[in-house]
Amino acid sequence: MSQTTEQIQKSDIKDILENSLKGNRPGPKDILRLLESDDVHLMGLVSGYLTKKQFGNKASFVNNIILNYTNVCITDCKFCAFYRSPGAEDSYTLSLDEIETRVKTSYDMFKIRQVLIQGGHNPNLKIEYYEDAFKMIRKKFPTIGVHGLSTSEIDMIARVEKSSTKEILSRLKDAGLQSIPGAGAEILTDSVKEIISPKKISSADWIRIMDEAHSMNIPGSATMMYGSVENN
C-alpha cells in the first residue's frame, strides 16, 4: 500500500481517494471528477484495496458462455456493430441443434453453470423458438442456468406475439428462464437513449418490465453504458 500512497499524493483526485480509504463515500461532484480523471489505474488499486479489506480473498463468479442466438435486428442502435438487417448476407439465426451443440461443447470443455442468451430484435422469431431453446437446455443440461433476454428483447417478442410483456415473461419462466440480464438499458436517461438507441424501449418501459419480472420471482440485473454522448 505504501507505493499506492505515494501515487495518491501526486494524483489530481488525491482528496477523493484519501476520503474513500477513510470509509467515506464520494458525493456527486466527486464522482464527476473521477469520471473526468485519467488516473484509472490508481482508482483500480484503491478499489482493489478497499474490496480486499472488506471481503478478504473471497470472490464469486459464474462460469458461463454468451450465446448470441441471432444477429438479425431491426433496432440498429448507433453504437452496435453486431446487428445485421433482416435478409443481410451475413445474418444468422441459430437452430435448436446448433444451440444444443454450443451448450454441450462449452459444458464438456469448461463445465459452465450458466448460459447468457442474447441476440438482436428479430421480428421473424415467435415465442416458441425461445421456449423450445430454454426447455431443451434445462432438460438436457439441468445443472446449467438460463440467464437470458434483455427487457428490449422481451418487448420485441411481445410485439411479435401481440401480447403483453407480462404474459411473455410467464411463458418464458415456465419454459426455463431463471433470470434476466440488464442489457438494453444502456443508460436510463431518455435524452441519451433518443440519440444512441431511439428505437429501443424507453427507460420507463425498461423499469416496468423489470418490475414485472421481479414480481414473478425472476431476478434481474442492471448494466450501465457510459462514455457515449452524455455530458456533465
Image (tube, rainbow, N blue to C red):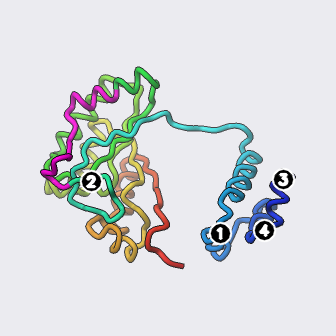
Question: As shown in the figure, which amino acid type bears the numbered disc 4?
Answer: Lys
Q: Pointer 2: what residue?
A: 83
Identify the mark at residue 1; answer none if there is no mark: none
Task: In the displayed orientation, state which residue is furthest to the front.
Answer: 89
Look at 35% across and 69% down and name the residue there. 196
Q: Pointer 3: what residue?
A: 3
Q: Does the residue at mark 4 contact the one at mark 1 (Cβ under 8 Å)?
A: no
Label 1 vs 2, first from the N-terminus:
1
Q: Could you say whether the residue bearing mark 3 is in a helix, strand or loop?
A: helix
Q: Position of residue 156 (x, y in %)?
A: 22, 56
Span highlighted in magenta in the image: 85-103
Q: Could you say whether the residue bearing mark 4 is in a helix, strand or loop?
A: helix
Identify the mark at residue 37; answer none if there is no mark: 1
Q: Position of residue 68 (x, y in %)?
A: 31, 42
Label 2 vs 4, first from the N-terminus:
4
Label 1 vs 3, first from the N-terminus:
3
Residue at mark 1 to residue at mark 2: CA–CA distance: 33 Å
Label 4 vs 1, first from the N-terminus:
4
Residue 100 as seen in the image, left or right of residue 55: left
| Mark 4 neighbour class, 10 Å CA radius: few under 14, some 14 to 19, many 20 or more | some
| Mark 3 neighbour class, 10 Å CA radius: few under 14, some 14 to 19, many 20 or more | few
Q: Does the residue at mark 2 contact the one at mark 4 (Cβ under 8 Å)?
A: no
Q: Position of residue 94 (x, y in %)?
A: 22, 37
Residue at mark 3 to residue at mark 4: CA–CA distance: 14 Å
